[in-house]
Amino acid sequence: MSTRQSTLPKITNLKVQNYRALKDIELKDITPFTVLLGPNGSGKSTVFDVFAFLAECFEFGLRRAWDKRGRAKELKSRGCEGPIVIEIKYNEPSFPLVTYHLSVDEVNGAPFVAEEWLQWRRGSKGKPFRFLDYRMGKGEVVSGENPDESDSRVPSPLKSPDMLAVNTLGQLADHPRVVALRDFITGWYVSYLSSDSARGVPDAGPHERLSRSGDNLANVIQYLSERDPERLRSIERALCARVPRFERVMADLLSDGRLLLQLKDAPFDTPTLARFSSDGTLKMLSYLVILHDSNPPPFIGIEEPENFLHPRLLAGLAEECRAATERTQVFATTHSPFFVDALNPNEVRILWRDEEGFTKSKIAGDIPGVREFMREGALLGQLWMEGYLSVGDPLVNGGAPSKDLGKIN
């Protein structure tokens, strides 16, 4: 791991309970670049949505994120009672590992925060210490740069039980560790990119960062051409290496104050309008804009990056994702063996549904024989297609693990 990478904040563990198919699952030792693999309906998109749900709770409020997903009726695991629990372990440089726990339930259709706390362990043998502890909008927090058990606890009731304490108190300078976690979560980029959205003609005005849908791609190109032309050249060079005949991208100002995104390809002098460009070219351009950000979001989530892209481009895209982890953490889902071919076994989490219908997970490298095959030159995607992974293969035991793969925890 590089020195730069070791200074970045990152998620190391994710634990989820009672969230749709995620009745009880924990992803441990999450790598800087992590990819979820599994059959349709295995829970990949649900894990992805956990990050989106948490980010939306901080950005728009719990009620909006809850209602958007159909409330408890659609959100809670089928046949299960009790709250939804999301717990992340978050590694902030130069500080102990922080655990953030959020427990949400519902009464009469209205969500409330049943429990929310932050804790860390000071020293390898120290007891876990909660420096933020809330239930139903009431609780206390320990302020300061390095909150300790000997520090005073300050009761700080919230206005409503559906408010998140970290989101509220994280706006106050008195609580720098809470501020750091709030800034981390509100900075996440959980992408639902659409090539159709990128074809729009938005109002002019430079935007530093791509929206989740990609509908401001022209605005970001305007920003780069005006304020960071070298980064734009870097993106264009990367796209040239992957899209035949592509030369450059531009955002032209129209007389009505809108932006027209255009892409020039050789040997023609006249560029092509984005509305007539291929889906794959626009998707690859959008991914490169995100991944080449010199100050990217602290966490980037990309769902099924292979959509609309030629299979031969996917290994290069995986390498772009891995290179970006020098500056951020990247989390993706995929169905493509060509994308998986470029991954190492520690980066892949395979998901499947057990006999009760709930999601289970296993690291690809923990499947017997996988590392040995790869040392002999096999690629992970090839092993998957040839049935050696078995776990997560929809044509083998319905995606469940074979008995000869050893015990799966």
Image: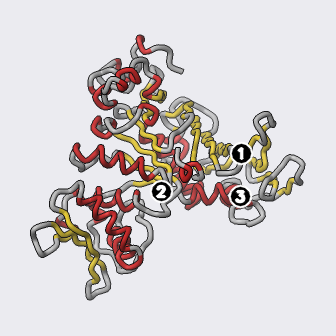
Q: Which of marks 2 and 1 is in front?
A: 1
Residue, disc 2: 189
Q: Which of marks 3 and 1 is in front?
A: 1
Quick one: which residue is furthest to the top in this view? Answer: 404
Earlier sequence position, callout 3 versus callout 1: 1
Earlier sequence position, callout 2 versus callout 1: 1
Counting from the top left corner in percent of width and height, residue 356 is at: 48, 22
Instruction: Check disc 3 and report its element: helix, strand or loop.
Output: loop
Q: Residue 96 carries which label?
A: 1
Tell me the residue at 66%/49% (across/down): 112
Within-10-Å neighbours for mark 3: few <14, some 14–19, many 20+: few
Q: Is residue 163 visible?
A: no
Q: What residue type is labelled 2?
A: Tyr
Instruction: Check disc 2 and report its element: helix, strand or loop.
Output: strand
Above or below — where is 3 with respect to 197?
above
Residue, disc 3: 160
Q: In this view, does 67 lie to the left or right of 183?
A: left
Q: Nearer the viewer, residue 351 or 106?
A: 351
Q: Which of marks 2 and 3 is in front?
A: 2
Q: Which mark is residue 81?
A: none
Q: In which quarter of the image is the C terminus?
A: top right
Instruction: Check disc 1 and report its element: helix, strand or loop.
Output: loop
Q: Can residue 356 be seen in this view?
A: yes
Earlier sequence position, callout 2 versus callout 3: 3
